[in-house]
Amino acid sequence: MDTSRALVPAKRGKQERRYRRNAEKRREICWFTNPASRDVTEADVETVVLTVHVVAGCIAMLCGFAALAIPKGSTWHRSTGHVFAVAMLFMGTGAAVLGYLHASSGDLFGGMLVIYLVATAWLTIKRPQGRIGPVEYAAMVFVAAMAASSAYSAFLAGISEAGTYDGRGLTYHVLVAAVLGGWAVGDIRNILNRGLSGSKRLVRHLNRMCFAVFAAAGPIFIARLQVFPDYLSQSPARYALLALPFLPLLVMPYWLVRLRGGRGSFPSSASIRRFGATVSPSGDGGAAE
């Protein structure tokens, strides 16, 4: 009798039993299949999200300020712009999640607003001329709803005895409603025109990216100066930190004038074509949207 063949089923059965035992052990320690092994708490999730939010915010600020200084349409500008957009999406998502965990409507909608700005600015350049998609419609509805909410907040602040609502004055709510309303009007024009062409695309892209850089730098340099060392959070360095988030908004008119006027080296026709838009020789300027 050939004993080697008789031992094959026994060996196979032993291997199968060992595999089953190992599989049961894996299921016992698996986070998805065994609820008892889920020792991940909300604090752990918050720590991970906060880390991603802070790291992405630092990358976004560095790339955002770099993109403002680099000649528009160049390879370096496109590369830093792509990194900035991805980092901003992570930062905005992190802010929205943290706002949800802390029941903070300001952080929640602030993070969603950052995602809106970056997404619409990026799509303005990336979509072919004369085309729009479902994202543009969703973005228009979102920012219009936020503008209406801010206008209602301004109304409540105006009729209140203290002249404030949600801890902020009437002027704040009016300014926010005006800015959001302007973006909503720009989205409506973009949809009605079935997309923008010429330098209008670059104006829209530049306008929204500059505000996105402001949104990335504002929460840390304006609202959270206490995280910096004392020698930075006290005057005169304090005023420099407070002014830093407004730098993109101060630089934006300079680039808009150069773009609309067709002066200087911003940007060459070849660079604009590579960047995703074609500007007519007459300049074909448009209002900031």
Image (cartoon, rainbow, N blue to C red):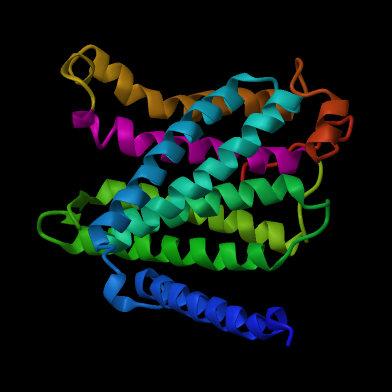
Residue 46's image quarter? bottom left
In magenta, the rendered stretch is: 199-227
Image position, residue 207 (x, y; %): 58, 39
| Pick the front one: 238 or 153 | 238
Residue at 38% over, 57% down = 96
| Relative horizontal placement of residue 74, taking residue 80 as reference (left or right) | right
Q: Quadrant of the N terminus?
A: bottom right
Q: Is residue 184 above or below residue 179?
A: below
Question: How many circles with numbers are drawn on the protein?
Answer: 0
Q: Is residue 17 above or below residue 97?
A: below
Residue at 80% over, 59% down = 131
Magenta segment, principal secondary structure?
helix
| Outermost left residue | 161
| Relative horizontal placement of residue 123, taking residue 51 as reference (left or right) | right
| Pick the front one: 203 or 54 | 54
| Pick the front one: 166 or 16 | 16
Image position, residue 132 (x, y; %): 75, 61
Residue 115 magenta-highlighted: no
The answer to whether any part of residue 179 appears in the image is no
| Relative horizontal placement of residue 146, taking residue 252 as reference (left or right) | left
